[in-house]
Image: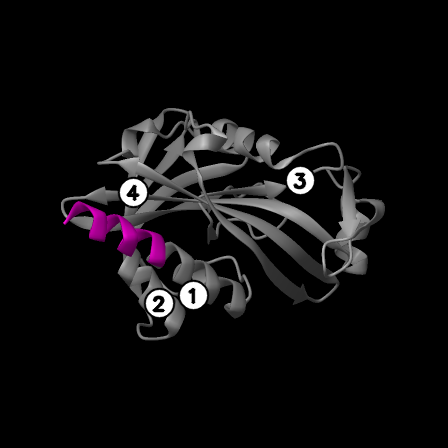
């Protein structure tokens, strides 16, 4: 995986060349990723899904993260990112079903790990309870949880220190129910700017949907 070839860009999105995944994170080159956040209206409330990263992942194992996300390789387009949703989560979605939220920058520096991403962000609105539709790729994703969107927003804004999530951990033999309190320390440490912007944009889409249904 570290030898995968990824297109690198300047901060403004002009392509500068190609580098290995390892070099991208060692040098802090800007690169592009695909992010898909999944929400659903259940029992009159908007919920958002977070994946539980597999313990076998090199980066941030065992932390909760964006519903589906991945790097775009040098020969890939945003449409290939949709394949990530199908492969990791088992959700049969097409690009036309996703709402494009735009490109959001996400910067992270931990020791020698320098991650500067231009994230192509999308929203997928499921219908009702979609818990049983997830079929996880266990090497990548070991579980799926949900919480009210307003709860996640409050956690990100610092209005709450902990929120409750519920869902499941997947095993080779089935699913184990999961219900726990989590804090920001349990999430992959995306930049505060990214988290603030993405929750703002998702909130706007949910508000728009609610206004159309009234």
Q: Which residue is mark 2?
A: 155
Calculate the distance from the C-alpha at mark 2 to the C-alpha at mark 3.
Answer: 29 Å
* Residue positioned 37% across, 75% down in the render: 158
Res. 116 in view? yes
Return the mark for residue 72. 3
Calculate the distance from the C-alpha at mark 4 to the C-alpha at mark 1.
Answer: 18 Å
Q: Earlier in the sequence, mark 4 or mark 3?
A: 3
Q: Report whether 40 appears left or right of 78.
A: left
Q: Is residue 5 above or below residue 201?
A: above
Q: Which residue is mark 1?
A: 184
Disc 1 element:
helix
Q: How far across and how far down the image is residue 147, in percent?
A: 28, 52
Calculate the distance from the C-alpha at mark 4 to the C-alpha at mark 3.
Answer: 28 Å
Q: Which residue is mark 4?
A: 167
Residue 75: say if magenta.
Answer: no
Q: Earlier in the sequence, mark 2 or mark 1?
A: 2
Q: Earlier in the sequence, mark 4 or mark 1?
A: 4
């Amino acid at each position: 995986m570290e030898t995968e070839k990824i297109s690198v860009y300047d901060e403004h999105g002009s392509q500068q060349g190609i580098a290995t995944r390892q070099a991208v994170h060692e040098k802090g080159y800007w690169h592009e990723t695909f992010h898909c956040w999944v929400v659903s209206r259940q029992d009159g409330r908007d919920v958002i899904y977070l994946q539980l990263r597999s313990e076998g992942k090199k980066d941030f194992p065992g932390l909760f993260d964006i519903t589906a996300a991945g790097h775009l390789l040098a020969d890939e387009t945003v449409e290939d990112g949709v394949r990530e949703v199908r492969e990791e989560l088992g959700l049969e979605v097409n690009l036309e079903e996703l709402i494009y939220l735009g490109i959001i920058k996400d910067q992270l520096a931990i020791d020698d790990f320098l991650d500067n991403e231009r994230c192509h962000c999308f929203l997928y609105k499921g219908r009702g309870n979609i818990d049983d539709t997830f079929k996880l790729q266990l090497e990548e994703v070991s579980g799926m949880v949900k919480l009210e969107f307003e709860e996640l927003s409050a956690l990100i804004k610092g209005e709450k220190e902990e929120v409750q999530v519920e869902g499941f951990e997947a095993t080779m033999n089935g699913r184990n129910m999961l219900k726990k309190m989590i804090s920001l320390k349990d999430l992959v440490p995306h930049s505060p700017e990214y988290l603030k912007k993405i929750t703002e944009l998702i909130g706007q889409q949910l508000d728009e949907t609610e206004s159309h249904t009234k």
